[in-house]
Image: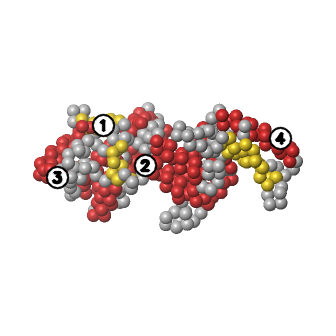
Amino acid sequence: MANIQERRDKAGKLISYSIRVHRGRDAEGKQLKPYTATFTVEPTWTEKSARKKAEAFAATFEKECREGLASDSRQTVAQYCEYCIDLKEQRGLKTTTLTLYRSLSERFIVPEIGHIKIRELKPQHLNDLYTALAQEGRNKNGGKLSGKTVLEVHRLLHTVLDQAVKECIIPFNTADRVEPPKAKKSDPVYYQPEEVEAILEALNEEPGQWRMLVLLLLVSGCRRGEVLGLKWEDVSFEYNRIHICRNILYTKERGVYEDIPKTENSTRYISIPADIMAELRHHRAWQASERLRLGTYYENQGFVFAQDNGKPLHPCSVTSWLRKFSDRHALPHLNPHGFRHTMASMLIYNGVDPVTVSHRLGHDQVSTTTDIYSHMISDADSRSADIIADALSFKKA
């Protein structure tokens, strides 16, 4: 039988019942913490009526406990959020995502709503949280958080509450009952043809490895970590293509480490222009000569782009080098992802279909590609109409 205890205020008025269901002992004989629940008494109820209702609630609660449909109702949002993130880690969630989740939880969720019990979390709590996060003074520089960051907080809470629904802690996902924050959509930053020409000209004055790396970023459209993860075994000179099957990442906790690509479709083959492959051959020959020169200092791990000791490059070193490179040659601000957008825009502008572009970029869905490059696709479609009109002689001479 469930244990039912009255709770009264200082005036002796009955306000609630504390209900406990014992769980027995663990394998070592230690008493397990009981399941607990609180049954609140409405002010209009008589004590006799309240007792009957509490007993009925306790019977239902005990049945749920015995059937594995209930858990500790005292868990707070902070406690359950930590539990859920740890569970995701055990299930193999990527380190970068775990790092993001823990940062969002520690910085924004726990300080604001971490004290609230998971069962008592209401839509109003989430609405108030999102409003508070949108105020000045919330980011590291004292300004507002971006809409994207607030939306990421919402998505994390939705994930956590979804787990609570699965574990029968709450009857529905509270995050489904609020209007999710809006993230401002920004157009992809890409480089104009004349800027690409200037970049290529400036690269002729730079060291071979960095020149090769930037060229590959431009023609492949790969993410920064995907290019850094390339090994010579992934390069096919026979078929003029590369195999994207690993990623180089960095977190403060793990340092530089090797991982699988971002998504399932990110593992892919990408065709590379023959002249770029020819330069890649020269780069391989140069690297081989460097290995001989450096001797045992060089730890050959097979990476196409490596540090002086043969270990993979730090991802941030690419961004840092591009910043200095652009300063040296008075070029526009450059970042690795800009080359990815540039390649995609060039393909779309020249009539390559979104499915092919999506595969080359490694997007999981074509809709991701069409959403990011919707403006460019619209422009390409307009040009297609002009081409059709010319071909059918609809235009006046």
On the image, the x and y values in percent for residue 79 come to 57, 51
Q: Residue at x 80, y 60 (%)?
A: 10
The residues bearing labels 3 and 1 have C-alpha atoms spaced at a distance of 28 Å
Q: At numbered mark 3, what does the secondary structure look like: helix, strand or loop?
A: helix
Q: Earlier in the sequence, mark 3 or mark 1?
A: 1
Q: At numbered mark 1, what does the secondary structure look like: helix, strand or loop?
A: strand
Q: Residue at x 56, y 43 (%)?
A: 30
Residue corresponding to mark 2: 96
Q: Nearer the viewer, mark 1 or mark 2?
A: 2
The residues bearing labels 4 and 3 have C-alpha atoms spaced at a distance of 79 Å
On the image, the x and y values in percent for residue 55 come to 78, 40
The residues bearing labels 1 and 4 have C-alpha atoms spaced at a distance of 68 Å
Marks 2,4: beta carbons within 8 A: no
Q: Earlier in the sequence, mark 1 or mark 4?
A: 4
Q: Quadrant of the N terminus?
A: top right
Q: Nearer the viewer, mark 2 or mark 4?
A: 4
Q: Earlier in the sequence, mark 2 or mark 4?
A: 4
Q: Nearer the viewer, mark 3 or mark 1?
A: 3
Amino acid type of the residue that numbered disc 3 sits on in the rendered structure: Tyr
Q: Nearer the viewer, mark 4 or mark 3?
A: 4
Q: Earlier in the sequence, mark 3 or mark 2?
A: 2
On the image, the x and y values in percent for residue 48 come to 87, 44
Residue corresponding to mark 3: 297
Q: Earlier in the sequence, mark 1 or mark 2?
A: 2
Residue corresponding to mark 1: 243
Q: At numbered mark 4, what does the secondary structure look like: helix, strand or loop?
A: helix
Q: How many badges with numbers are in the image?
A: 4
The residues bearing labels 2 and 4 have C-alpha atoms spaced at a distance of 52 Å
Q: Residue at x 53, y 50 (%)?
A: 82
In this rendering, does residue 172 appear at all? no
Question: What colour scheme governs how the chains and residues are painted in the rendered image of this protein?
Answer: secondary structure
Amino acid type of the residue that numbered disc 4 sits on in the rendered structure: Lys
